Image (cartoon, helix red, strand yellow):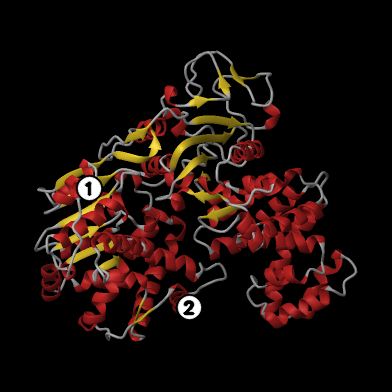
Amino acid sequence: MTIHMINFEQELNQEQLDVVQNGDGPCLVLAGAGSGKTRTITYRVAYLLEKGINPENILLVTFTNKAANEMIERVQKITGLESRLPWSGTFHHIGNKILRKYAAHLGYKNNFTVLDADDAQSLLKLVVKEFKTGEKFPSAKIIGNIISYARNADQAVGEVIDKKYPGYWPLSDTFADIASRYAMKKKEANAMDFDDLLVNLSALLNLPAVQHYFATQFQYILVDEYQDTNKIQAAIIDKLAVIHKNILVVGDDAQSIYSFRAADIRNILNFEEKYPDAKIFRLETNYRSSEEILDLANNVISNNSKQYAKKLRALKSGLPKPALHPQIDQESEANFIVKKIVEALDTGINPNQIAVLFRATHHSQALEIALARAGILYDYRGGLRFFERAHVKDILSYLRIFNNLADTAAWMRILQHEEGVGPAAAQKIIAQVQRLENIDQLKNIGDILSGKALAGWNNFFKIFEKLLQRSTEPDCNTGELISALLESPYIDYLETEFIDSDDRKKDLKQLAEISKKQKDLSDFLAEASLQESFAHPTDQQKLKEGRIVLSTIHQAKGLEWKIIFIINLVNEGFPNARALREENGLEEERRLFYVAVTRAKENVYLTFPMQADGWGSGAGPSIFLSEISQDLIDDHSLLRSSSSVFNNSNDDEIQYISEDDDQPIKIKPGSFLRNVDDL
């Protein structure tokens, strides 16, 4: 094996070089945002290879296939190594590779099947049918998510329900029985799902002979994104490092944002407790962001009590401070962002260097509408675009039927949700509907049905009846029609089918809020349809136009842009209301804000709607904004005689000055706008 000689002193800064040359024994590398983490890990591997360590004796573990491939390709490029590192990849990849040889020790055959997500869901559905009681029994998807979280967190199903999903507590024992039966079914089929690849690997390494074999083989273990490991993954690494103890974990506790996937920040915070002789390295030189942006990021994260203190240092300065731009309402916020994007594009900024980041998917809908109206193409990350989401399409389908009884596609979509209404019954209903002369005759459709199909139709009509009733009220608008559906049995469907039903309800509440200005339903449905077509431009458009990025902050981690907007910075929006109810939730929300800020290279815009409709009783400017030292932000929109716009304790009035109007609007101290009429 011939390895290229590398001038490490020339290729790395001093912080990185220290890790590469002195990374023996237990090591914790605290790699701040934009500090060259991947570069440090790959050069550490190259250093070991140059020192004569056999590739078979190096274990390199990452979280995604993309990250694994990137690191392996970098190692090959800088070392000249022709073949891939044999023991590199995701935790699941490593688990599968080891289990293929030793599965028999756990009662499986070595040719076990790995179930993909769809196959695992299908098998679990069969099990759930055995235990299902009542019409409102949770779906297999909900139960599967709870079981998966419990396994990755190494907790009992009942414990997870008690802490995270108390509404399902009466079914706690049933869920535990389903989990046991599901495990038995998999074993009978000689199959493992993705969680089994981790849980079974950990169990396998409890066997002394197997553990000794692999702990002896892996002389050096390197783990990327260690702050994102769950309890099972951390245990696997500890078991493999028990002999040589050359374990180098790289991560940033300030970017630990995946507790909803069972990631456990205690793995990185308590590393020194497990390894008292551990060396601690800090990568604090930031190659991405300006000094002005990092000053804000450092300021915000300093409010977390559970952390390794670090201070990112920038290599560039003299750029604009992060700018705070409160807006009157969500529509104004969206229009402001579009205006700033157009200004940036007019200066020659590439669209793909601009991103709008948000805490949750339902925060983006007003902006998506505004971007479409302005003809600005965008990529959406972190889920589907607003008008492509299943629950939004459901609501639009109810409205389409209300607007046009002959809409076959809309009928097919909503009838498929009703238990007992199969394809044949649906076709029968549609054929009958198309013979009706007016909407009032719709209730008579049940006369042609029987049994389960009739029960399904009756449930549908309970939903549709809400629309009919609301439509007769004075000044009814599209938003009111959507609100009527949110008061119907359709909500029962959301709650039994989706573990994130609360988020989906927020999507629909925001849609109702935004749609209140739409009196004409046909116009609203036409615009929604145009939104969908805009989301899928032709290939010619894609080649001709770049795109800005809309993304949840979770999906933005690891990425960077010249200009970012962080929107909807209101309490109960960001920080997220549900997260605040969980242990250490505020600290994780603050880490999420830190991640958002550190995605930017040159400009950060912070915005929030001053009208609080749709956000909840505790809404107001985000607590994170109140924590920022005022000299670190450029406040473009608010003037007052006191030093802080968020902590005014005297009797002075606040003056809100919009960018398009020189006339100040006076607001009483301590108040937060609940309605545009307040202005």
Q: Element under label 1?
A: strand
Q: Amino acid at mark 2?
A: Ser
Q: Position of residue 564 (x, y in %)?
A: 50, 41
At which x and y percent is residue 335?
Answer: 66, 38
Residue at which label 2 appears = 122
Relative vertical location of residue 133 with respect to residue 484 in this rendering, above or below: below
For image coordinates 47% across by 65% down, the residue present is 142
- Residue 415: x and y in percent read 69, 71
Q: Which mark is residue 29?
A: 1
Q: Residue at x 33, y 39 (%)?
A: 286
Which of discs 1 and 2 lies nearer the camera? The answer is 1
Of mark 1 and mark 2, the one earlier in the sequence is 1
Name the spot of residue 215 as percent of width and height, x first.
Answer: 13, 68
Q: In the picture, residue 283 is in which quadrant?
A: top left
Residue 192 figure quarter: bottom left
Picture quadrant where residue 30 is located: top left
Question: Is residue 489 in view from this perspective?
Answer: no
Identify the secondary structure beneath mark 2: helix
Q: Is residue 146 above or below residue 311?
A: below
